[in-house]
Amino acid sequence: MRVRYAAGFMAIVLSVFFEAGCGDTFRPIALPIVQPGGQPQAQANAVIISNAGPAVDGTTTHIDTTGDSNVGQVTVGRSPIHATFVSSNQFTVVANSGSDNINFYPTFGAINANPAGSVTLTAGAKPSFVFSNVPNTIFVAEPGLSAVGVVTLSGTPTLVTDIPVGSNPVGLVGTSDGQRLYVANQADGTVTVIAPSSNSVVPSVSGQPNPVVVGSSPVFLAVSKDNTKVFAVNRGNDSVSVINTNTNGVTNVNVGASPNFAFFDTANNLLWVTNSGADTVTVINVLDFTDVRTISLVGTGAAASCASPAKPVSITVLADGTRAYVADSGCNSVSVISTLSKTVTKTIPVGTTPVSIDSTTDSTKVVVVNKGSNTASVIQTSDDTVAVNVPVPASPVFVAITH
């Protein structure tokens, strides 16, 4: 199974933000999740969250990527913001920032007939992110409480505890062995390390303090395939902090303006970072942090069709390691980048204001959700063209594909 880890802050996509406490904001992103073993499903679903606002319930739409068809929708809570999968993709879990709860339901089968179960969180939690690297356990970033909620799906699903962390937690990532969970605390520039075995904050690592001080305004986290490095994307000072998971030591790497998202490319040992304020992507060789490349998404010759700022907000890399695909929210397109040449090879027109992107584990499809046109564009990678634009409910903000 492939392990992949996937909060932009530009004016054109402000409508997909929600207040996350302490005056800061957080944007949902595509985040494929570590899964606890098992055989992959024959069917692959792209799960799309639509967030029509705090006054109405949200929805998830499931697109079967093998046939590019809508196979069902589920009503979830208000202001849904993020989703993940548990138990080898069997269940979908959704964080509802406006309802202070999470929903869960079977990912496959007669989706319309599956009522979504619900777990109520502590009042004021404003859940922004859900993650799982422990079987039947969901970790929930709760910016309203400066905590991480722990929810068990075993027996009667329930909230087990709230673990105090730093101010305004907005992102989570964990090691694939389930030994550590990392929390990005946007308001105080730190990353908290949690031991899932005890649902507690680790006092220190190799004598180094916890939480770990990183750059200003960390908004997203990623982890290396070998679990030795965690990457914090720091929007406030245009950097990525590399945390050594054995020592808590930190190395800082400069990137472009207003970085908002990162994707760890396991095939090539590269970290790809979208810089929304610079219209660029930074590529970092995690084996040699002096090998840092910058790729412009505009003005790149025949491949460029973006006349306005690209404002990249999300990126995915194919499992075969050949290409990266960037959601360019500013020019309604997806940039295709060769991982070998580190250049843009094609720009694919999609719907209006693409905000989230993901790819299938067999490298044949890429799905991008377009908030402005209420569609999901399915790109076939054999020729890098849009196979179909699938209508979805108003204000889609997020997509993740089962892996």
Image (spheres, rainbow, N blue to C red):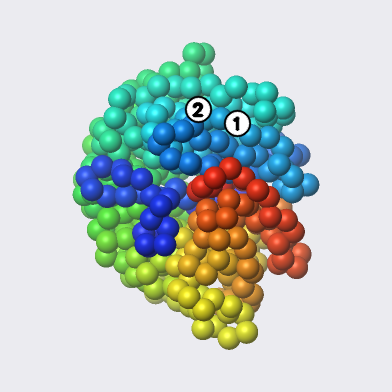
Quadrant of the frame with the C terminus? top right
Q: Among all residues in the image, which is located at the extreme right?
A: 67
Looking at the rendered image, the disc whose residue lies closer to the viewer, 2 or 1, is 1
Residue 94 in sight from this viewpoint: no
In-image side of 42 versus 15 (left or right): right
Determine the CA span between mark 2 and mark 1.
10 Å
Task: Choose top left, top right, bottom left or bottom right for residue 71.
Answer: top right
Q: Is residue 292 above or below residue 225?
A: below
Residue pointed to by mark 2: 103
Mark 2 lies on a secondary structure that is strand
Dot 1, crowdedness within 10 Å: few (<14), some or many (≥20)? some
Q: Nearer the viewer, residue 366 or 272?
A: 366
Instruction: Tell me where residue 356 appears, x and y as whole percent.
Output: 52, 54
Give the residue drawn at x 36%, y 59%. 9
Amino acid type shown at disc 1:
Val
Residue 328 in sight from this viewpoint: yes
Task: Please report contact status of discs 2 and 1: CB closer than 8 Å, yes or no.
Answer: yes
Residue pointed to by mark 1: 74
Dot 2, crowdedness within 10 Å: few (<14), some or many (≥20)? many
Instruction: Tell me where residue 195 appears, x and y as whole percent.
Output: 35, 34
Q: Among all residues in the image, which is located at the extreme bottom?
A: 301
Instruction: Tell me where residue 394 appears, x and y as whole percent.
Output: 54, 45
Quadrant of the frame with the N terminus? top right
Amino acid type shown at disc 2:
Asn
Instruction: Tell me where residue 273 appears, x and y as whole percent.
Output: 45, 64
Give the residue drawn at x 31%, y 67%. 238
In-image side of 372 versus 119 (left or right): right
Q: Nearer the viewer, residue 63 or 50?
A: 50
Give the residue drawn at x 51%, y 83%. 299
Give the residue drawn at x 47%, y 50%. 29
Q: Nearer the viewer, residue 315 or 319?
A: 315
